[in-house]
């Protein structure tokens, strides 16, 4: 790198260090889930699934972007100019209660008297890291969170722990960014292209529309990735994989594979030779006769029995034996018939 460029980069990283220290004091929610990308050959066939590497440069750009978004929101608010905020509301008490009920099952505590803050969630994730349960608890914390959305009313951003936040700049241009750009042009008399009078009357409608299309786009992305991964694994029927239980329902177990991040399902009717009862509190399936348990977050080995590329679905057989245990008294009273309601049903990936 040429010296002038190297000097500029050095200064940028010094600024980033200052911002990183400020971020640590602010204590936003820190959930680091691996992001995977699908690799294709020149003919468009899937040849692999990779975890995206995250470098300091990515974190630098992200932190600068956040500060730019904050500055834009604050500048427009000071100018009295209407805008569209990016809002993330605090989690609902019912969701936090669910997390509070689950954590003791993996020897972690959450006192319901404590206020749910990003810092408190981070502490649980840090404690889980010491038990090799970081991904499990991160996933649980993520499920307690509300979905972020766009609105003309400023309600703050819980996850980032910010009082003012708008989408003004990003690696990928969003319509919300353009709305904020027009507001800045109008507020500071920067020329043509400012927010029109008609657009001002439609900010609520625009906010709802782009929030909806964002959710649709995210669902389409997930579905596409599921289908590509199912296609990639379709010629590996009978192969065994290491993974983790990422969800538990009466119908069975959801499994996330370590190597590819693929999500699949183990129907309860295929597990062992006894009936299994679902325990909501501990997020477990428990054998009605032996008390053998499969709980959320447990590491397991599974065999792929079916792949459905068009649906993006994977069906597994669990090879790992259940952990020893006893059936809780509150479940023993209502032993069900053996999962007859789910016989023969195909399951797509769980939508959380």
Image (cartoon, rainbow, N blue to C red):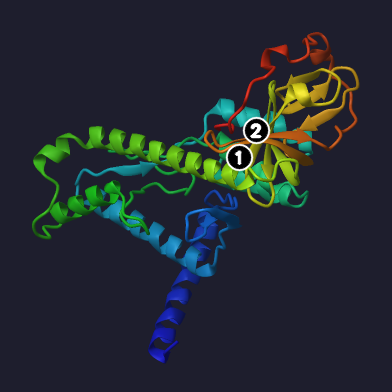
Residue appearing at x 80%, y 26% in the figure:
271
Disc 1 to disc 2: CB gap under 8 Å: yes
Label 2: element kind:
helix
User: Is residue 254 shown left or right of residue 292?
Assistant: left
Could you say which quadrant of the image residue 352 lies in? top right
User: Is residue 230 shown left or right of residue 130?
Assistant: left
Where is residue 268 shown, x and y percent of the image? 74, 24
Most foreground residue, 312 or 161: 312
Where is residue 4 shown, x and y percent of the image? 38, 89
Residue under label 2: 99
Label 1: element kind:
helix
Residue under label 1: 141
Crowd tier of the residue under label 2, counting other residues whose Cα lies within 10 Å: few below 14, some 14–19, many 20 or above: many
What's the mark number on residue 30? none
Where is residue 16 shown, x and y percent of the image? 47, 70
Residue appearing at x 52%, y 45% in the figure:
225
């Amino acid at each position: 790198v040429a010296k002038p460029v190297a000097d500029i980069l050095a200064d940028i990283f010094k600024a980033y260090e200052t911002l990183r220290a400020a971020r640590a004091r602010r204590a936003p929610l820190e959930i680091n889930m691996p992001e995977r990308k699908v690799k294709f050959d020149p003919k468009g066939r899937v040849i692999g699934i990779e975890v995206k590497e995250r470098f300091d440069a990515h974190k630098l750009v992200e932190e600068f972007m956040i500060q730019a978004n904050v500055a834009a929101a604050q500048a427009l608010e000071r100018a009295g100019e209407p805008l569209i905020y990016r809002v993330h509301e605090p989690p609902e008490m019912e969701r936090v209660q669910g997390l509070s009920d689950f954590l003791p099952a993996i020897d972690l505590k959450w006192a319901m008297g404590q206020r749910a803050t990003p810092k408190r969630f981070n502490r649980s994730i840090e404690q889980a890291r010491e038990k090799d349960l970081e991904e499990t608890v991160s996933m649980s914390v993520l499920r307690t969170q509300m979905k972020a959305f766009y609105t003309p009313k400023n309600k703050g951003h819980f996850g980032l722990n910010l009082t003012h936040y708008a989408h003004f700049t990003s690696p990928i241009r969003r319509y919300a960014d353009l709305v904020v750009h027009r507001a800045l042009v109008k507020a500071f008399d920067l020329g043509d292209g400012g927010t029109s009078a008609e657009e001002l009357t439609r900010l609520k409608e625009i906010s709802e529309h782009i929030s909806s299309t964002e959710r649709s786009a995210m669902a389409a992305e997930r579905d596409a990735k599921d289908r590509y991964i199912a296609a990639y694994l379709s010629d590996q029927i009978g192969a065994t994989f290491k993974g983790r239980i990422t969800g538990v329902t009466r119908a069975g177990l959801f499994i996330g594979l370590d190597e590819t991040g693929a999500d699949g399902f183990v129907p309860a009717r295929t597990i062992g030779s006894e009936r299994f009862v679902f325990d909501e509190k501990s997020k477990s399936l428990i054998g009605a006769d032996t008390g053998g348990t499969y709980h959320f977050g447990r590491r397991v080995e599974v065999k792929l029995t079916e792949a459905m590329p068009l649906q993006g679905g994977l069906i597994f057989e669990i090879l790992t034996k259940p952990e020893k245990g006893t059936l809780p008294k509150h479940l023993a009273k209502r032993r069900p018939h053996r999962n007859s309601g789910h016989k023969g049903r195909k399951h797509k990936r769980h939508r959380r």
